[in-house]
Amino acid sequence: MIRTVGLRRMLPAVAVASSIALIASGCSGDDKGEANTGGGSGGDSGRVLNVWAGSQTPIVANFNPFMPNALLHATQGPILEPLFYFNKVADAAPTPLLGESFEWNEDGTSMTIKVREGVKWNDGEPFTAKDVAFTYNYEIAKPSYLETAEATDDTTVTLTFNTPSFTNEDGLLQMLIVPEHIWKDVPDAAVATNENPVGTGPYTVESVSDAAYVLVANPNYWQEGKPAVKKVRYLALNSNQTSSDLLTTGQLDWAGMFSPDPSKVTGGGTLAMINTPVDPTVLYTCSNAELGCEGPQTDVAVRQAINLAIDRTTLNEKAWAGQAKTISPTYALLGRDDKWIAPGMEKESPQTADAAAAGAILEAAGYAKGSDGIYAKGGQKVELTLSSVDGWTDYNDAAKLISEQAAAAGIKITPMQVTWDEFAEGRSAGTYQLIMGGLIGTATADPYSLYRDWLTTEATTPVGTAIASGDWNFSRYSNPDVDAAVLAASGTLDEDAKKAAYTVVQENILRDMPYIPIVVNATQTFMNTKDYTGWPTEDNMYAFPPSWASVGAGIVLADLKPAN
Amino acid sequence: MKYYVRRISFYLITVWAAITLNFVLPRLTPGDPGEIMLAKLARSGVEITDQLVRSVNLLLGGATEGSLWDQYVNYLGKIFTGDLGVSITTYPEPVVDLIAKALPWTIGLVGLATVISFILGVGLGAWTGWKRGTWADNLVPGTTLIQSIPYFWLALLLLYIFSVKLKWLPIFGAYDVFTFAGPEMSWEFVSSVIYYGFLPALTIVLSSVGGWLLGMRNMMVTTLSEDYITTAEAKGLRPRRIFTAYAARNAGLPSIAGFAISLAFVVSGSIVMEQVFSYPGIGMLLIRAVQGKDYALMQGIFLVITLTVLAANFLMDIFYGFIDPRARQNG
């Protein structure tokens, strides 16, 4: 009986308590709601600039530049700086940061760098050429082609290489310089979390929580008067939708992300969007029967026919919401790399489909149309599968559209959606026919690294053997002429000699189509132009604008100014 | 007393089975998860030291020295010292720390929302059952209609209306990250947590209250037609006493059993809710582990989920034996 009474007393008490909790949370909701929206988007100069951190929650404090899962958006650029910055969206000379100038020797086996004087680390220690030499010699960072790095005096560093290394210039000079007095005592640089990073960049770390981290201006920064924005907060957001909602409501000032309808995000009037496409989207083809590729696409005529059968205008409108840019079949970036496209070469890939021309190529190669409207040769029909990673909706849509367009030209392409693992495994082992994929755009105004990493024999393996990390020749393309031309281009700084070499490469790839060009994919950046000025613009693209851009993000942050 | 001894020993055996299964499963799957994990670490630029290889293998099985039995003993030792290994997506953060950071948010929000939903649903259900045949019956189709709306759609819609359009409520997170540099003990912080948790909690309550209400109402109607209710009425007891002590108490038994189960699954988080609201709980962590093929983290989360389900069931068994003497007699 006692128990019954207890229960009877308890029930109303619980009910009351829970309703109080509900009322309380409702009330505080209203109060704070107004305070938040009022304070969040004010334009005063003291306010914190909010940036999408790219990382997901929970954030773990880790500013180790040598670790792939550190908080790199802030580490690369805002906190640590390299000697020079190479702007991937402009054909411009490298921007000097910690370096002042550099000079190659005649044959590209040694480089002398003049280092900036009077720079201090954010802990007050002076920065010297010794730190630079230390970084290049540091085991975890040392490139394989580097022989020695030596500080000859406080402002000069001499590097020597085991091969001519002209083409490694951007990778080498964009290496983030770390302080010797800190890192020489780190026992294992691969696992150190470097929670209080010492750098030369415009910002230092103020605080880290599981949801965000805050940077404050470095008072010792070597560029007088910069940065004008004193605090930057990096927010961990778990989805594009959240980021886009925050941008729309004015709670986020800078984010690099894709939105199919950017005008909806920028509709409020405080934001601007800038689109800087750099990465080509292509169809990988397993093209080389000699290395073990199987399927109709090993015939160059089939690849050429598919190239002509694709309607790129429709693809861009339907799959990329009109945000992608025209691609060049030389894979050079149109606008930036125009001078490297050999004269007489087809500059842009065809923007409309030409089924008749595609058919003519197949017929010339001995194919005949069967009763089902599909071309065939020797009883072998032109039937291919096209894989795209499930959930990459732009690729999935494009694959479906390409399948329809190819059917009109008598080529049967079956789109397949695969998991990321199947995609990675297939392209690495060469067990595929066609894949919707991307090429990595080059970091400088020169298609060289793309030619070397994606087209040379050295960067590939026979089918069944995985391609080494850092190599990307998934099409198994192997052509001695291209190999020789790429090698020739690597050993010279002479522009004409390079152009001659690229002409050979381009003639070959335009015929062989190891990667069938589709579009150059969009890279959108949203930024608050009402409260802050100094962003990169179409007319003044002084740095690659996304908030995730390595090194570029530090330059943009240092240049920003509060609008009032 | 015998009842409790039996229950406790049953649960001890189940816990042991769960932990053992967690040990055996990775060793039964084709391929070597340890190898995959090391390859993944190597590809992301982490140097593979001997120590790392040993700890990965110990955790996941694979080419380890020692017999299966030695591995098993080692593994048990690690579990009991709270060492669940190292996450690769946030290397070198220990899995235990990641789970410890995420768990309070999930338990706080999803747990509270589940309790509120249960109390609200059962309370209203008892009341509509009592008032059967009146206008109160309309509550049943009303709440089940809301429940039948797909959760993610309801959540996105409310988020769009209240957070993006009206700007009354926040868009993401567990607290105001623009003001607080991390959790702290202050009234402002607590109220911020309540404010940020309000909409996610509301969506959970809206999408689950209908089930409790319907179940309780139907049990209530059945119970009210029992003979002992008629007897109680004939004795002239006050209706209020019949409602609480005779009808609601008996009708609520199945709901309480169901509550135990739903409470246990609180720990697995509400994956969709945490995704929509970018809420830093266990569900979010699990998605991240799956996306990053982070086996150690996944294993850790599964172990925690299994153990909590068992613990909640155990507590409910004990509690059930307390409120329903029949369970003690026959159990």
Image (spheres, grey):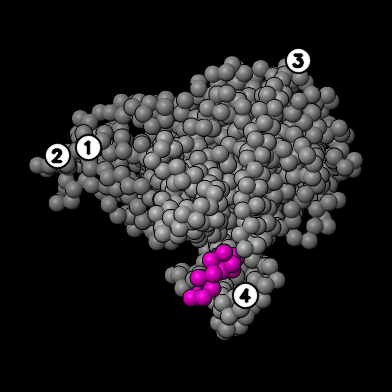
Quarter of the image that includes the N terminus of chain A: bottom right
Q: Amino acid at mark 2?
A: Gly
Q: Are marks 1 and 4 on the same chain?
A: no
Give the SS element for disc 4: helix
* Upstream in sequence: badge 1 or badge 3: 1
- Residue A42 position (above or below residue A361): above
Res. A407 mark? 1
* Displayed quadrant of residue B93: bottom right
Give the number of the mark in front: 4 or 2.
4
Q: Are marks 2 and 1 on the same chain?
A: yes
The residue identified by callout 3 is A564
The residue segment tinted magenta is B314-331
Q: How many marks?
A: 4
Give the number of the mark in front: 3 or 4.
4
Res. A373 mark? 2
Give the SS element for disc 1: helix
* Displayed quadrant of residue A208: top right
